[in-house]
Image (cartoon, rainbow, N blue to C red):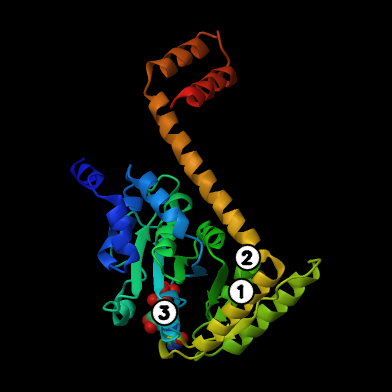
Amino acid sequence: MASSSRRRELDVAALVERARAGQPRAVAQLISLVEDASPQLREVAAALAPHAGTAQVIGLTGSPGVGKSTSTAALVSAYREAGHRVGVLAIDPSSPFSGGALLGDRIRMQVHATDPDVFIRSMATRGHLGGLSWAAPQALRVLDAVGFDVVLVETVGVGQSEVDVVSLADTTLVLVAPGMGDGIQAAKAGILEIADVFVVNKADRDGADRTARELKHMISLGRQELTGPSWRPPVVRTVADRGEGVKDVVEAIAEHRAWMVGNGELERRRQHRAQTEVEAIALQTLRERLADVAGSSALSALAGRVLAGELDPYAAADEVVRTLDTTP
Ligand code: GDP
């Protein structure tokens, strides 16, 4: 592949240095290495490792149309005003196309397009081996290590993706809007467990009060089952396209962070995140090795023995796994 061999020639140390000096093009190149699953990623990861772990990671999830992109843009403005460098990863688990105008870098983000202290990237994860679980944490790691102190991770709430965003974020915002049937449905989908902060966006619409009330009621019911100290997710109302209530969201995020720092939860979440990350890479490595075996004569020989009744499939699989152990 022409592109990967060209990339193989990149001077990783220089690239990381340029990215850390704030050059958006260098940051974009590093993230492209992640997306391409470049063989240079090991080198990149090693160069980044000493600098990672400082960014505050905020996840946003919710149904399509609820206002995630608008809210992300508004939050970027708020954090920029506070002097932070802000990275945005807009993850689209339903699309195989990357870098395009899918989520976060649509028109709403254009006010930030010329700000060198804002970096916005869409990532499509369908078709990626291991999906979000593998690529997104590495992209996040890049943004963290090159000096973005706040990283917003936006993902559409479909199926597994909300859960994935939780495993990435320090604080997860779940957005709902009045009249979208989100309230009760959300609770059923287990969204109560993942939200650190609920945002009722489109509070300019009828039914916002009711949606907020329903959420609060569900939160109080949910808490009865909990034991020990716990965080009660606040319900914040916003009109994201007018920037209303965004300050309250920022405050709620800060309070959640203070709570996590105070009781060790932040450390626990980050430990869990690192563990998931290592596991995802290990699985990816195993998959690649398995793919090598799948095309090998050794596997067809094993299959032949299973077919002949000499070997049961479990014993054959054990043999495959043993081969993986010894493959460098
Ligand atoms: P996403 O699909 O969740 O990212 O949602 P978008 O941010 O694209 O917003 C969907 C639509 O809702 C857009 O037309 C926005 O302009 C509009 N929108 C976003 N926030 C608000 C709000 O607070 N009130 C109203 N009335 N419309 C909003």
Find residue 257 and name its label.
Answer: 1
Q: Which of 90 and 55 is in front in this view?
A: 55
> Reading the chain from its start, which is encountered first: label 3 or label 1?
3
Q: Nearer the viewer, residue 181 or 250?
A: 250
Residue 113 placement (x, y as % from top left):
28, 77
Quick one: SS at disc 1?
A: helix
Q: Nearer the viewer, residue 228 or 115?
A: 115
Quick one: SS at disc 3?
A: helix
Q: Badge 1 local density, few (<14 within 10 Å), some, or many (20+)?
A: some
> Reading the chain from its start, which is encountered first: label 2 or label 1?
1
Find residue 179 and name its label.
Answer: none
Q: Which amino acid does label 2 sit on?
A: Leu
Residue 171 placement (x, y as % from top left):
57, 70
Residue 315 visible in the picture: yes
Q: Do the residues labelled 2 and 1 touch (CB within 8 Å)?
A: yes
> Reading the chain from its start, which is encountered first: label 3 or label 2?
3
Residue 178 visible in the picture: no
Q: How far apart are marks 2 and 1 (CA)?
A: 7 Å
Find residue 266 and name its label.
Answer: 2
Q: Which amino acid does label 1 sit on?
A: Arg
Q: What residue type is labelled 3?
A: Val
Of the four image quadrants, the one with ligand 1 is bottom left
Q: Badge 3 local density, few (<14 within 10 Å), some, or many (20+)?
A: many
* 135 horizontally vs 101: left or right: right
Find residue 76 and name its label.
Answer: 3
Residue at figure coordinates x 30%, y 75% from the top left: 116
Residue 175 placement (x, y as % from top left):
53, 75
